[in-house]
């Protein structure tokens, strides 16, 4: 036997720019017996990877084909323009697409912003990847507009970036095949959504803390603290004669039923 059935595992894909460290750490704390394997994948190849079973779930960039894939949008990134540190744009805190009209703006083939019409003037040739475009920016060939996480991923000491106020934004989501919503996928969804380990929607909630047993309500006067002036011994179980006279129990005249009390 290979033991694969006894040893489940979870494969998590992620596209460039996404940092899954926080969620992986929580997974390892909650499910230490289920190893999580990270699968890096390009933004364009992420959906085919999920459909082909190469990963159980993945962090992708929207849009997602909802016919066969489920998705939970997580956050929207700031869009920035990558520029040399000595460029004029560094003098401002933010630019607009119109501010780049006279610049050559590189548009790599793996672009994730989905421009209807990219700003600026097009380069003679589109770079194959975002990394190639970053190197061209460093060489002074043009500028590049990307999600901020990609600018950080491909950071260089001779480059910086500024936000582009009116550019399209890239949204990151957790996605998985609709027909493969397994228990482990549900576990990871709970982690990403911030559910606690005791959440009722989680598959493996931690055992609830033992609750103290509720005290039974007192149903009889015999279990209550005796009222002032009344005996707590056998006299409390006496008949009506023991309760009729205010001095019966003390003087021995009022109560005629039961044995006399012993003095300690």
Image (tube, rainbow, N blue to C red):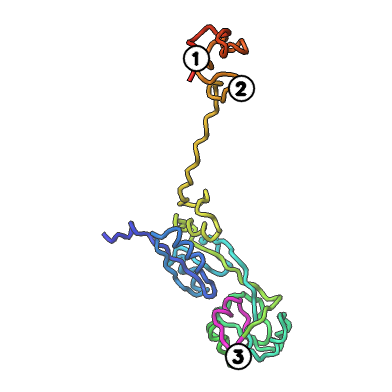
Helix, strand or loop at label 2? It is loop
Q: Is residue 148 above or below residue 69?
A: below
The residue lying furthest to the front in this view is 264
**1 or 3: tag closer to the N-terminus:** 3
Q: Nearer the viewer, residue 150 or 55?
A: 150
Label 1 environment density (alpha carbons within 10 Å; few <14, some 14–19, many ≥20): few
The answer to whether the residue labelled 3 contacts the one labelled 2, judged by CB atoms less than 8 Å apart, is no
Q: Is residue 118 above or below residue 221?
A: below
- The residue indicated by pointer 3 is 124
Chain part drawn in magenta:
144-159
Helix, strand or loop at label 1? It is loop
Dot in front, 1 or 3: 1
Mark 1 to mark 2 CA distance (whole Å): 18 Å
The answer to whether the residue labelled 1 contacts the one labelled 2, judged by CB atoms less than 8 Å apart, is no
- The residue indicated by pointer 2 is 228
Coordinates of residue 91 in the picture (x, y in percent): 72, 87
Task: Tell me the quarter of the picture where residue 132 sits.
Answer: bottom right
């Amino acid at each position: 036997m290979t033991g694969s059935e006894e040893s489940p595992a979870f494969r998590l894909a992620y596209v460039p720019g996404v940092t899954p460290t926080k969620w992986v750490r929580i997974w390892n704390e909650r499910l230490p017996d289920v190893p999580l394997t990270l699968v890096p994948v390009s933004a364009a190849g992420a959906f085919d990877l999920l459909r082909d079973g190469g990963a159980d779930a993945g962090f992708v960039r929207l849009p997602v084909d909802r016919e066969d894939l489920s998705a939970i949008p997580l956050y929207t990134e700031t869009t920035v323009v990558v520029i040399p540190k000595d460029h004029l744009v560094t003098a401002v805190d933010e630019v607009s697409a119109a501010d780049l009209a006279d610049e050559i703006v590189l548009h790599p083939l793996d672009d994730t912003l989905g421009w209807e019409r990219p700003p600026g003037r097009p380069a003679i040739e589109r770079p194959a990847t975002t990394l190639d475009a970053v190197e061209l920016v460093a060489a002074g060939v043009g500028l590049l507009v990307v999600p901020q996480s990609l600018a950080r991923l491909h950071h260089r000491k001779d480059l910086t970036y500024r936000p582009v106020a009116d550019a399209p934004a890239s949204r990151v989501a957790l996605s998985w095949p609709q027909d493969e919503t397994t228990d482990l996928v549900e576990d990871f969804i709970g982690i990403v959504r911030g559910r606690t380990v005791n959440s009722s929607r989680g598959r493996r909630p931690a055992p609830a803390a033992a609750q103290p047993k509720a005290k039974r309500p007192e149903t009889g006067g015999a279990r209550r603290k005796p009222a002032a002036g009344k005996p707590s011994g056998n006299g409390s179980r006496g008949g009506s004669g023991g309760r009729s006279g205010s001095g019966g129990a003390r003087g021995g005249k009022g109560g005629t039923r039961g044995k006399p009390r012993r003095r300690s």
